[in-house]
Image (cartoon, helix red, strand yellow):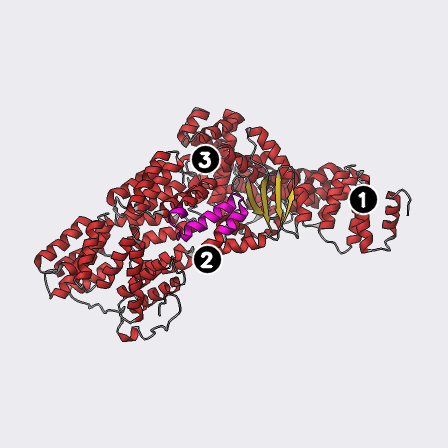
Amino acid sequence: MIRRAAVLPVLLSLLALGAAHPVIAQGGALAQGTEALRTGRYDDAVRLLRAATTSGGPADRTRAVRGLARALAVTGRHDDALAALDRAVAADIPAAEVGTTRGRILRAVGRDADAERAFDAAVDGGASDVVEARLERALLWWDRGERDRAAAALDGFIDLYNQGRARTAAELTAVGTAVRRLGVREPDLFHDAVRAYDEAIAADPGAVEPRIRMAELFLATYDGGEAQKLLTEALAIDPRRPDALLAMARAKRFEGSAEAAERVDQALEVNPRHAEALAFRGLLLIEAGDDAGAIEAAEAALEVNPRLIDALAVRGAARYLSGEERGHAADLAAARRLDPHAGRFLTTGAELAARRGRYQDAVALAERGVALDSVAWDAWSLLGMNQLRAGRIEDARRTLERAFAGDPFNVWTKNTLDLMDRLAGFVVRSTPRFRLVLHPDEADLLEPYVAAVAEEAYAALSERYGYRPVTPVRVEVYPSHADFSVRTMGMPGLGALGVAFGNVLAMDSPSARDVGGFHWGSTLWHEIAHAVTLGMTRHRVPRWLTEGISVREERRSRPGWGGGVGLDLLAAFRADRLLPLRDIDEGFIRPSYPGQVQVSYAHAGLLVELIERDHGTPAVRKLLEAYADGLSTEAALRRALGTGPDAVDDLLADHLRSRYAAALDAVEELAAEAGRRDTRDPEALAASARARPDDLAAQLAAGQALVRAGRGARAEPFLERARALFPDMTGPGSPDALLAEIRLAGGDTAGAAEALQRLTTRDETALAANLQLAAVLERSDPASAAAALDRAIHIHPFDPETHRRLAELAVALDRPQLEVRERRALVALRPVDRAGALYRLALAQRRAGDSAGARRSVMAALEIAPAFAEAQDLLLDLSGGDS
């Protein structure tokens, strides 16, 4: 039973009372046409149902003409559909019997006044589909702002259900849609909507409509997984249904898949005049930075349906984001004339502003949206999440609590509130320009390292780009990747390592990933670079440039940080899968193949590097200034570089072909061999490699095979040649990794060190190689050994042995402050012998001239172990011999 304010008994016998799903006969034009319509064979449906309108009794002919009109309308032939209904009424079909169908078609083309009259005719005339007519009329009232009138009508569907008068799949679907709309005022009704849709599917297992409507409900609460299950079922029945394809496109957008665009294009192939699909295509274009294309798509939607607020919202958002504030205001005014409560116009703009990284704009638009529509719980949620992104923590909590009270089924809202409860237990440590928000279990260890990187990055990047982000910059470091993901997007599952919301940054702690899984130091530097470029451009910089600059800045931050050109980028280039500069943001937003996001980062970083090489570092700053002035990519490149995007694409292609010719020739073979054990004869491979000295794959295969066969000395020339052909190659089977292995085994520590130095300066996550390099150089070159250990700590700071080794090297190098840092880290790692760790910290502090700190540390040691004789002696010494 569906309830208003309290749970009433459910009429479980409803289906038994007659809601069996209709049986379609095998023969006859009406039966065949109905089945063709149900399964997406729309041309066949039109032909068969048109024939069926001229035979049989009035009831059959009514069903035939309704089906014919739907088949025509679903492919965008709205005028033909209305004409078919007119002919039927002119014959002998009562106008009331086609009123619901007529009204739906009229609404699809924005003729709402005519649609209302059609629904009235169906209701007043007691049409056989009067339940659907009542629903459509109430929805029309709601959509034009008459919410109390609409709610009263929708409330009647609860009685309809509870009295057992909703029997067919169509009627049960109507009940589900009615109570779903009422759910904005009473969220428990969402459960009842799901129940009604489930019963509709049980009543007619072949029905597509209830599956689509229930999927839309799940999408509204950000449950994309359940939505996709339902839509997969719907599309298995009717693979061409535009509404199902559009809903699937929305679901795919929810998960950031390139399939979103593919699905909406499929919908438009079936119905080129599907106004909602055209508007959604515009929304996708805005996310990719194509505001002009979005406006064109929205205007195409408005040509079909000039009353479609979703299309006005897309056009308005595109205008707002491109600086056309008057156009945005005009579109908002038009939307409010259609519905005074058109908060979704502003909510759409807020969501798209956030997708483009303009979080303050998102807050401003969402605030205006909830002012127009106080029960738009998605707008409240969006407002709260963007307040959180903007660093307005307490405002965000209040807003999200209000959103959750209105819609407790929104998983983004719930997840974010749960995260904020956990975040309240973090500790805050301050530096001159940062507020570091750290988990209490990690704060003492991470603070000195995070603070040093953050302050160094701020100083270097501010000087380079002439912009100082507003301070304090907030940095949140999460030991749970799921928490970081929720902080970023409201849901677990994000693949990124860090995110910048402006002067609020969030990132994974190194403990959130597998040991050696990422370089937390370069990740933090990367995000601080975003704080600079976002702030400098007022968040107008496109994704490719802000990411490209951040990648570039990683590489020049410290030796061994950042990555180089890898095989994944070269493979994408060779396969013609690198997107042109005009479309490169799509690779970040909606990747179309595995690994495309990582390829896009490398692609963008290389573009910035080449722009600097050919036009100088100031050119990148000029490019940022052009975006800050609101210029398009084409115009910004013309102003800053004197060239266009095609020329920049050509620059990249020429560079890759000239510098990486050997790797490009071998990339397909190397990819095919990756992870597969080569069983070919090593000597045969060696002979082949000698005959083909410029074949990277041949050189590498010979070297690897000879190493596996235990013939390291024989392998070296091939590995050296492979390294010369592709110096940037890294990883366990790379030339330098194997050369280091061979030389260590042969006692050639100098040669091993040379290979490990090359490897660790090109592979920022080479944790084992850095530790190995430090061991090799510890006696011969302690400074380089210390540098290798420092690199290792910025990959994985939780290994006590690494800190111990670096502390001892610091003593040998007479670097007392470094020793203090490492001794503090050892204390923070909670050793079993904590008193001993504190004592050694006190010794380091004394060597560094910090007598007060040394006294505090040694006293802490004595609190743990009062009989610790060496600590007692040190305390006496620090106290000048006084007892």
Q: Amino acid under label 1?
A: Ala
Q: Position of residue 395 (x, y in %)?
A: 51, 47
Q: Amino acid under label 3?
A: Arg
Dot 1 lies on which element? helix
Secondary structure of the magenta portion, mostly?
helix
User: Which numbered disc, 1 or 2, marks the residue that appears first in the sequence?
Assistant: 2
Determine whether, in the image, residue 77 is placed left or right of residue 616: left
Determine whether, in the image, residue 185 is placed left or right of residue 42: right
At x 54%, y 48%, the residue is 394
Determine whether, in the image, residue 768 is placed left or right of residue 66: right
Up-down relation of residue 639 to residue 696 (above or below)? above
Question: Which marked residue is nearer to the observer: mark 2 or mark 3?
Answer: 2
Mark seen at residue 405: 2
Q: Position of residue 138 (x, y in %)?
A: 27, 57
Decide if residue 803 is in sight here.
yes
Dot 2 lies on which element? helix
Residue at the extreme left of the image, as rendered:
91
Mark seen at residue 239: none
Q: Amino acid under label 2?
A: Ala
Residue corresponding to mark 1: 854
Range of magenta residues? 369-398
Tags 2 and 3 touching, CB below 8 Å: no
Up-down relation of residue 824 to residue 48 (above or below)? above
User: Which numbered disc, 2 or 3, marks the residue that appears first in the sequence?
Assistant: 2
Q: Quadrant of residue 151?
A: bottom left
Question: Which marked residue is nearer to the observer: mark 1 or mark 2?
Answer: 2
